[in-house]
Image (cartoon, grey):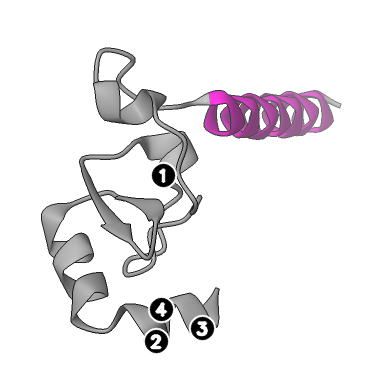
Amino acid sequence: MKKLIYMLLIVIAFSCNKKEANVVKETTSVIDPKNPLNKLKYDNKIDFYCKMDITKYGVSDTTHYKGKLYGFCAKMCKDEFLKNPEMYLAKK
C-alpha cells in the first residue's frame, strides 16, 4: 500500500511540473520596451534569415526595401537578406 501511495505522489509531482513549465514558456517575452525599434510597425513578423519571431523577441536592426520596413534580430540576418531580398520575399 505504501508503494502505491509513493508512486501516486511521484506521478502527481511530475505532472504538475510539466503544466507549470508550459505556462511559463508561453507567456515569456524578451522584448525590451526601452528599445525604440520594438515600437515600429514592420512588414514581417519573422526574421527572414534565421526565422526568429521578432514580435516575441524584438528587433535590433532594420532595412527599407521597396518602400517597406523589415525588422531583423541581428545585423548579420539583415545583411544576408540584402544579398538576395527577392528570394526571401518569394518564400514569404
In depth, the one of 15 and 55 nearer the eye is 55
Location of residue 12 (image quadrant): top right
Q: Give the Cα separation between the discs numbered 1 and 2.
A: 20 Å
User: What number is the disc on residue 54?
Assistant: 1
Which residue in the structure is indicated by mark 4? 88
Mark 3 and 4 residues: CB-CB less than 8 Å, in contact? yes
Residue at mark 1 to residue at mark 4: CA–CA distance: 16 Å
The mark nearer the N terminus, 1 or 4, is 1
x 39%, y 86%: residue? 87
Q: Which mark is residue 43?
A: none
For the point 32% across and 70% down, the residue is 49
Estimate how packed mark 4 is, as few (under 14), some (14 to 19) or many (20 or more) residues with alpha carbons within 10 Å: some
**Over which residues does the magenta segment extend?**
2-27
Q: Secondary structure at mark 4?
A: helix
Under circle 3, the secondary element is helix
| Proximity of marks 3 and 2: CB atoms separated by less than 8 Å | yes
- Residue neighbourhood size for the residue with mark 3, other residues' Cα within 10 Å, grouped as few (<14), some (14–19), many (≥20): few
Image coordinates of residue 70 in percent, x first then y, are 36, 53
User: Is label 2 in a helix, a strand or a loop?
Assistant: helix
Residue 90 is labelled as 3
Q: Is residue 20 magenta?
A: yes
Query: Which residue is labeled 2 in the image?
Result: 87
21 left or right of 84? Answer: right
